[in-house]
Image: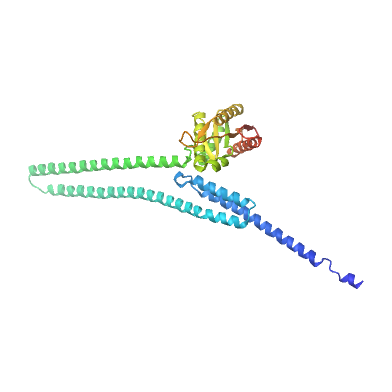
Amino acid sequence: MLNFLNRSPNPPEETDIRSLTEKAAAIQERCDVYSRSITVILHFLKAFALDVQELQSDRFKEEIEEINERFQAPEKPKRLELQFEQRKESILDFIDRQQAYIKDRERELRDIIDLLTRAMANLNVENRDFYQRINHQGEKIIKISALDDIKKIKNALKEEVDQMRQIVQLREEQEQRQIRLLAGQVTSLQTELEKTREKAMTDALTGIYNRQALDDFMAERIERSHMSNAEFSLLMIDIDNFKQINDKFGHLIGDRVLVALAQKCRTSIRGEDFLARYGGEEFIIHLEGAGFRNALKKAQQLCNTIASVRYATSDSATDEYLSMTISIGVSQFKKGDTAADLIARADKALYDAKHKGKNCVVGRKS
């Protein structure tokens, strides 16, 4: 009876197992937090990269995406560490090159500001000199009034008036030169600003509009829809098996494929339509005035056109050719839609097209 009362309710082995299970769960939860944090940090790192062709930003973003895929895959920690060490130098090199690029642009802006500052300073110096000379001539005219002979006064005044006319004429010529110089500088600055703005809104690789330009356009188009009932639709386009193209032919050919698709899309749309690179191998076409049925028809035509073309992988006549296909998701604007709603429907339709077998068109009305 005493032995029964002294027995422990939980044997030591059971307590140890429960403790180890709780510790394992805590470790797993911490690992999940680390994994999610790494994914977010890598996403921020991609967003940090400027879309500048000379910096090879697209290559950098692809490398970051590959690192993210490695971290999500069930690989051994030592292998992950080795792969990250191999990529670390290229990441630091890109960051250094981007910082140098930004510093160069800052120096160019400072040079422009210095140029305008010196121009204004020169104007101030010339104004001061001009007023001093006018004041000197005024003093000489005052002294003339002290002469007794009227003829001498007349001749002296005529001479001083001529001198003042010459001073004023010289000043006018100087001001005209300064105006022409500043006008030229302003025109040059306006041209540079326009080029900079256009560059900021253009995808460096394909030459079409980029994601920022698309966001601005869609915001303006959605706002305009409140005043107009005109229809419009979106096509979201994605190259099928693009990673396989990169793996087989290399990133240079992959870039040429993106450029070729952009050119085909550009020649297939009208002047009032809008084409932009959404990201990676995804493109968006805004079809102004197109209803759902017409947008599906246009998307199918484009899908067929791309699938029927073969692309040379080099300038050599004996080189290998490649073909590609695209999948397209279609959505039509509905009253009350935001830009995010419209793009999300097109994205879901694209997802359905991929699962349907690719090289096809799927539309979503809701």
Residue at the extreme front = 318
Left or right: residue 60 compared with residue 112: right
Res 219 quadrant in image: top right
In this view, the residue in front, 196 or 169, is 196
In this view, the residue in front, 263 or 276, is 263
In this view, the residue in front, 116 or 97, is 97
Residue 195: x percent and y percent? 41, 40
Image quarter of the N terminus: bottom right
Residue 231: x percent and y percent? 57, 29
Residue at the extreme right = 1
Res 228 quadrant in image: top right
Residue 254: x percent and y percent? 52, 40
Colour mode of the rendering: rainbow
Number of marks: 0
Residue 183: x percent and y percent? 32, 40
Left or right: residue 86 compared with residue 334: left
Res 152 quadrant in image: top left
Left or right: residue 219 compared with residue 188: right
Q: From this viewpoint, is residue 118 visible?
A: yes
Q: From this viewpoint, is residue 230 visible?
A: no
Residue 333 drawn above or below residue 48: above
Image quarter of the C terminus: top right
